[in-house]
Amino acid sequence: MSAPFRLMRQYELVDKVRAYNPAVNEDLLNAAYVYAMQQHGQQLRASGDPYFSHPLQVASLLTDLRLDDATIAAGLLHDTIEDTDTTRGEIEKRFGKEIAALVEGLTKIKKLDLVSKEAKQAENLRKLLLAIVEDVRVLLVKLADRLHNMRTLHFMSPDKRARIAQETLDIYAPLAGRMGMQDMREELEDLAFHELQPAHYDTIVKRLEGLKRKNGALIAEIERDLAAHLAERGIEAKVKGREKRPYSIFKKTERKQVAFEQLSDIFAFRILVGATEDCYRALGLVHTKWPLVPGRFKDYISTPKQNDYRSLHTTVIGPGQQRVELQIRTDEMHRIAEFGIAAHALYKDNKAGDTARMEAESRAFAWLRRTMDVLAEGDSPEEFLEHTKLELFQDQVFCFTPKGKLITLPRGANAIDFAYAVHTDIGNTAVGCRVNGRPASLVSELFNGDEVAIITVPGQAPPAAWETLVTTGRARAAIRKATKAATRAQYAGLGQRIIERAFERAGKTFSPDALKGALKRLARKSVEDVVTAVGRGEMRSHDVLRAVYPDFKVEQSAHAAAGLDDSWFGLSSEQNVRFKVPGGDPASNAIPIRGINADLPVRFAECGAVPGDRIVGILTPGEAITLYPIQSSALANFDDPHQLWLDVRWDVEASRGERYPARIQVVSINEPGTLAQITQVIAETDANIDNLTMRRFSSDMTELTIDMEVYDLKHLTAIIDGLRARKVISDVQRVL
């Protein structure tokens, strides 16, 4: 039979605070206690208990974290605005602006659905972190609120239980961990795990109970043995063994793909000593008593985690050849490991709202501020959700710059992530790296202790493909931003050239200042927006011309059929097209094209184009320029040359050795070794095959379509001639 329900009395709550804060504001806590109890009145929880029992339990949990009076008062009042007739103004009038702001922040958080569809979830997570970064005490009260709700979750309906448990596992437990509150994180995880996967939870708990019965005496023996061993050598230490938590064990079996029985470090021991130097002395004594398991030593004292966690971790072969995991830390380090950011000294001198000092003194809070910086760089809530989840869930590795600066990264991060963690400009201009003094790839995974030197080249831009290679949200956001900026600059450059040439043909002078006066007529905010829209094919150059010179009329006159002196194949200059072959007039204002690595957004038509071809650029809205050889049959599909056809020419440097796409069709005789002869010819001429398809259209003949990369038209012609010289080849034609 359960004990009858009893509310904690006012004096009991005050006494709990006085135990760690003799200067407690008793009047404030009494007033908050009475006001919250009166406002919630006869309200009941799903369990049937008075609703006021919940904020009272939240306040009690906050006293366990040894928080300041204002935070505890906010815990008592945190549901008043949401669940009663109380307003923020009323809270502010009775308890002041500080407490009113905390209660209002908690009210906003309560309304957020963090397990809804991704877009809504992302935006709500953004709002949550914004509320937290204004005053981190909002998070501390919310975590206490969530912990009590999880402890009483079984009174809720099944659908609500599942939603709340999933939200806890996805958001609140990781946030508690990032704030260094490990005990709270572990309890939240276990409670959510029990609700979401009860069968797995029960199985692990039963096995842990079996191990405890079996090894209970051994645990007690190790505790006594270790404490005595250290005391004999002058180190006063408290040694306490404990089993790992069910959810932690479950995640480890999943991550390592092993059964429960294969885990060798179910039990861990904490050794608490008085001073930092005693941690290292104790470590040496442990390692001389029991052999170290190689690769299982971590020094989080010299390199603390981002959540301020400090400790020495080691695993040794203990009594009975059992692996024993040890954590060695001071009492102060243990307090921070338990309470995290709540253990910060700012809470003792009533400066808990001083975010500048908090960021300077707390690595956990500094991480939160950096996360909000990523928020500012993201273009969408979904990106922010992706970045934040990456930051929340990844374990860490610790690397160093050549000057010894510590860089903390998620497990699995590479040198690109490292470069962006140092500075965005370093990441954007990175071209190579050295890891531990040796040349390495930028995609090399980094490990604890690596020293990384990034090689940069000014003016370099990150390839778009890097976005899929990095691990950190910061790097991904910066790459995406730089890629978008580079693409926009390409379109703007192309648009500028197109507009300049349109103005020149009209006998007008283009200037950005003249264009500024036409922005309203073009419905654009800036000159850059206009030139970018033209470059993307979303706006016509003649529309820009008419916007700047409203009285100007484009005259299109018929051209005599014999007028071929300034055009090819009867395409007149009035059609806005002028073509130039390599070596032509260098003063031509045709747009120069180098190839697939050009500064302009350019792609080749499916049939390809090579230097030596007379080419046409087709401007497709949103896709920029597509290059076609002038004899391509596909050009018949573009019947508006005045608007879509661009004057382009090759601008090729032979020394660069660039290859360009071309397609040929080969009809061959079906004989053994035919394909080998074809590829031999292509290989001997230093071409490269991109793709090859075959179609047998008779028992004796096969048609091959070959996509190649060649240097120029002369190179392509040599390949075709070489193929035609083979007896097994019936015909070779270039596909246009």
Image (tube, rainbow, N blue to C red):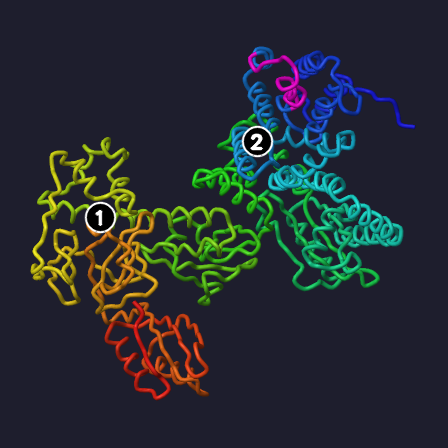
Q: Which mark is residue 121?
A: none
Quadrant for residue 262, please give it. Answer: bottom right
Q: Which mark is residue 643?
A: 1
Quadrant for residue 274, please give it. Answer: top right
In the rendered image, residue 448, in percent from the top left (x then y), is placed at: 57, 58
> From which residue to which does the magenta span run?
72-89
- Would you call the spot at circle 1 few (<14 residues within 10 Å), some (14-19), or many (20 or more)? some
Q: Is mark 2 on a helix, strand or loop?
A: loop
Tell whether 358 sits left or right of 246: left
Tell whether 486 sits left or right of 313: left
Tell whether 569 sits left or right of 658: left
Distance from label 1 to label 2 (Cα)?
Answer: 58 Å
Whether residue 304 is situated above or below residue 567 in the rendered picture: above
User: What's under tag 1, amino acid-wise?
Assistant: Gln
Quadrant of the drawing holding the N terminus: top right
Viewer-nearest of labels 1 and 2?
Answer: 1
Is 27 magenta? The answer is no
Is 74 magenta? The answer is yes
First in residue order: circle 1 vs circle 2: 2
User: What's under tag 2, amino acid-wise?
Assistant: Val
In the rendered image, residue 736, in percent from the top left (x then y), is placed at: 29, 67
Tell which residue pokes out farthest to the right in this image: 1
Quadrant for residue 183, please give it. Answer: top right
Residue at figure coordinates x 35%, y 72% from the top left? 708
Q: Residue 136 carries which label?
A: 2
Whether residue 150 is situated above or below residue 574 in the rendered picture: above
